Amino acid sequence: MRMNKNRNRLRDLGRSFLFRPRRCQYCKRGDCVPLTQLQTGQSALVTRNSDLRSIERGMYHGMQVNMFRNEPGEPNLIVAVGDARYVLDRRIAALIMVRVV
């Protein structure tokens, strides 16, 4: 039987493996821009995304994104990821960093 002191050490070790911070690829200065700054018709690679909903839709690190409509007066933008098209709010799109291809 293990001592309580050793049991607590092992429990803390397991927590560090479960709750690791997500790895992000930080861009060099001027290399990456927010998704809201893409022009209509441009394509880019996702480099950083902290929004869980958009990650579940397929906008994870390294995925190619095509901008379909980005008009400054509208509150939403339309992007394509793979075969799907999504409508994103500008506040969420500002959190997604991309590198123009």
Image (cartoon, rainbow, N blue to C red):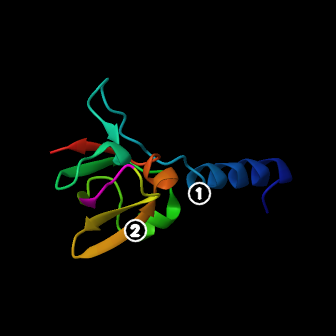
Q: Residues within 10 Å of mark 2 (few under 14, many from 20)?
A: few
The kind of secondary structure element at disc 2 is strand
Query: 90 or 9, which lies in front?
Result: 90
Residue 65 in the image, given as x and y percentages of width and height: 25, 58
Rendered image: mark on residue 85:
none
- Check disc 2 and give the amino acid type: Val
In the picture, measured across the screen, residue 48 lies left or right of residue 1, that is: left
Residue 22 in the image, given as x and y percentages of width and height: 49, 48
The kind of secondary structure element at disc 1 is helix
Label 1 vs label 2, nearer the camera? 2
Residue located 64% across and 49% down the image: 13
Mostly what secondary structure, the magenta segment?
loop
Query: 89 or 71, which lies in front?
Result: 71
Q: Which residues are magenta?
A: 68-72
Residue located 35% across and 61% down the image: 59
Residue 31 location, quadrant: top left
Query: 49 or 20, which lies in front?
Result: 49
Residue 76 in the image, given as x and y percentages of width and height: 43, 61
For disc 1, the marked residue is 18
* Residue at the extreme right of the image, as rendered: 4
For disc 2, the marked residue is 87
Q: Residues within 10 Å of mark 1 (few under 14, many from 20)?
A: few
Assess whether mark 2 and mark 1 are in contact (beta carbons under 8 angstroms).
no
* Residue at the extreme top of the image, as rendered: 29
Residue located 40% across and 71% down the image: 57
The CA distance from mark 1 to mark 2 is 32 Å
Residue 100 location, quadrant: top left
Closer to the chain start, of discs 1 and 2, is: 1
Please say whether residue 71 is one of the residues in the magenta stretch.
Answer: yes
Quarter holding the N terminus?
Answer: bottom right
